[in-house]
Amino acid sequence: MGKRGYHHGNLRQALVEAALDLIEEKGPTGFTLSEAAKLAGVTPAAVYRHFAGRDDLIAEAARQGYEIFADVMQFAYDRGQPSALASFEATGRAYLAFARKYPGHYIAMFESGISVNRTPELAAVAGRARAVLERAAEALSQHIPPEKRPPPSMFSAHVWALSHGVVELFARNSPGTQSPFPPEDLLESGIGIYLRGLGLIPPDG
């Protein structure tokens, strides 16, 4: 039985928890539905009453991950208020913290090949998470002259990509990608350089 502890009154959730354990251990394509069933302590036939296949199971793990992720991002944004700069920087740090605390969810969301448009529910919650970062970017970009202001969606996409790159290369203990600096420092300094380039923080800040 997996490390999360399952409640068989909710078989569907027990299977998701089993999948998260297997995703962490073997990757999103490294396990079968039968393995998930075994880890959850049920027969393979029972799985098909809830999920049509492995991708459906991973998609549900991703959906639940985005629910947590959106809440984490919103909490970080709110903690930074009323400072637009503090809120923006907090959302970047929250991305890294989420990836570390919820690796199975993170992999299901970003590394499984499952499209966020697979189901309306998954698309909606993924959009909610993106909207938090875009809101932070939009508030901060109000301090940039209109003629120099990137669209908030581009602004937030740059920071999302920077955060994702730091996670993928340096926060996942991948072989051969050890950084001489902590991932948090890499992310903070990278965001700082980006914001200086936009004139949002002073050059000596």
Image: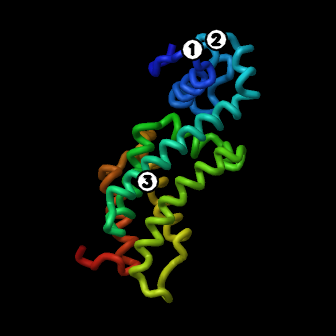
Asked if the residue at tag 1 contacts the one at tag 3, i.e. Cβ–Cβ closer than 8 Å, the answer is no
> Identity of the amino acid at label 1?
His
Which residue lies under the disc numbered 2?
42
> Identity of the amino acid at label 3?
Gln
Left/right placement of residue 92 relative to residue 119 reads: left
CA gap, disc 2 to disc 3? 37 Å
Asked if the residue at tag 2 contacts the one at tag 1, i.e. Cβ–Cβ closer than 8 Å, the answer is yes
* 33 to 133, vertically: above or below: above
For numbered disc 3, what is the local secondary structure?
A: helix
Which residue lies under the disc numbered 3?
74
Mark linked to residue 81: none
Q: Few, some or many C-alpha atoms within 10 Å of disc 1 (few <14, some 14-19, many ≥20)?
A: few
Percent from the top left, x then y, of residue 8?
57, 14
Percent from the top left, x then y, of residue 11?
61, 19
The quadrant in which residue 176 appears is: top left
* 52 to 94, vertically: above or below: above
